[in-house]
Image (spheres, grey):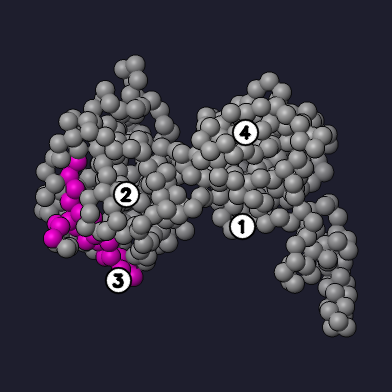
Amino acid sequence: MKRIVLFFATLWLGVMGASAQGYRYDVNNDGSVNISDAIAVVNKILGKKNPGDVGGGEAVDLGLPSGILWSSVNIGASSPEEYGNYYAWGETVTKSNYSQSTYQYYQNGSYVNIGSDISGTQYDVATALWGDDWRMPTKDELQELMDNCTSEWTTVNGVNGRKFTSKTNGKSIFLPAAGYHWYGDLRDGFGYYWSSTQNPDYASGAYGLYFGSGNANWGSYYRYCGFSVRPVRPGKDNSPAEPIDLGLPSGTKWASCNVGATKPQEWGGYYAWGETEVKLIYTENTYKYYQNGKFVSLGSDISGTEYDVAHVKWGGKWVMPTLDDIKELLNNCTSEWTTFNGMTGRKFTGPSGNSIFLPATGARYDSGYIYNPPGFSLYWTSTLDEESSEDAYYLGVDSGISYWYASSQRILGLSVRPVIRK
């Protein structure tokens, strides 16, 4: 006991001494360095929880298409109705004044580019403070929440807010109307929650969820505003695949089999780009996202969204590969056309010596006819062709040409080989 007391006293002196020298040790983000910060550090060392340190709260499965789970509490809160803390977009500490002049990423008269989406990065307050796969929701995930849940303005323990209830399984989360910080004021009565997605048209703006007693929607807001953050995390991993570490520079791991398969040599399912179910006919008329003579925009990249068949079917961290993932695979692996357990295809071997086998599954079009399965195969990426909203990029493998990437109409039924990014 004496050793613990001595350690605590030494730690306290160290914290206060560092504070006097200008270092920041406001561990619990209460705006000052005091005895509670030393207590917080000791509790962490001893494995105890601090007030409000809920480790991410309960992960609530709302039965969403993407499979993501929503936290039951805001960052800085320990119960659903508590407001919690407020953060400027991309910042990971609280402050007393939320203005353009105090915004960390407004420098020399312009806004610093910290990425088009900060979910899971060093600028993500959920990842920085909670870890354990928690992150800020993207704009698409906010839209998914609204599309797949009913919502009502209600009161929980005397606090107004909006309750989102799943249309699938009936589970719900409550988001208190915590308001927002603007300069030195707290403007309450409504709910403002950050997404991780920047507004591509305005460097000063990022998207967030807004709601009041009458509606709920997302909008674009100044990045320096102090909003609430309600984190999300991946759902349960339902995949039959093993993540293969090929030794790629990015640390990305590739699945050992296709979506819809359980073994490397199995073909698995065929999916139109953005769809998550197999079907008999693959044409414009049967394509879910071809409406009124036009292709519906699903975004420039669907990896990790509700349109990502890998993420929807397998959950966890599994997603469709991007075009950059495909390029990395081709640039860093050797390959050979071979036969594996009676199935022809292409084997890619990475710098680590590990390999993946992509069976020659061909492609489905029109009445479901499998076009030339023995000779080649096409695998979707999550990346839209920037020059044509009708097309998306794919990886092609062939017995003679070796491999390539190109784009084709989103209506085709192609294979999908998922990845897990570091």
Q: Is residue 202 left or right of residue 338?
A: right
Real-space CA distance between mark 1 and mark 4, rounded to the nearest whole angstrom: 25 Å
Q: Which is more foreground, mark 1 or mark 4?
A: 4
Residue annotated with mark 3 = 353
Contact flag, marks 4 and 3 (Cβ < 8 Å): no
Check disc 3 and give the amino acid type: Gly
Residue annotated with mark 4 = 164
Q: Is residue 176 left or right of residue 319?
A: right
| Residue segment shown in magenta | 342-363
Looking at marks 2 and 1 on the same chain, the residue that comes earlier in the sequence is marked by 1
Real-space CA distance between mark 3 and mark 1, rounded to the nearest whole angstrom: 31 Å
Real-space CA distance between mark 2 and mark 3, rounded to the nearest whole angstrom: 24 Å
Q: Badge 1: few (under 14), some or many (20 or more) residues near its Cα, within 10 Å?
A: some
Q: Nearer the viewer, residue 132 or 187?
A: 132
Q: Nearer the viewer, residue 322 or 238?
A: 238
Check disc 4 and give the amino acid type: Phe
Residue 319 image position (x, y, % from top left): 41, 48
Residue annotated with mark 2 = 259
Check disc 2 and give the amino acid type: Val
Is residue 281 magenta-colored?
Answer: no
Element type at mark 4: strand
Q: At 41% from the left edge and 58% from the top edge, which residue is drawn? A: 252
Check disc 1 and give the amino acid type: Gly
Residue annotated with mark 1 = 131
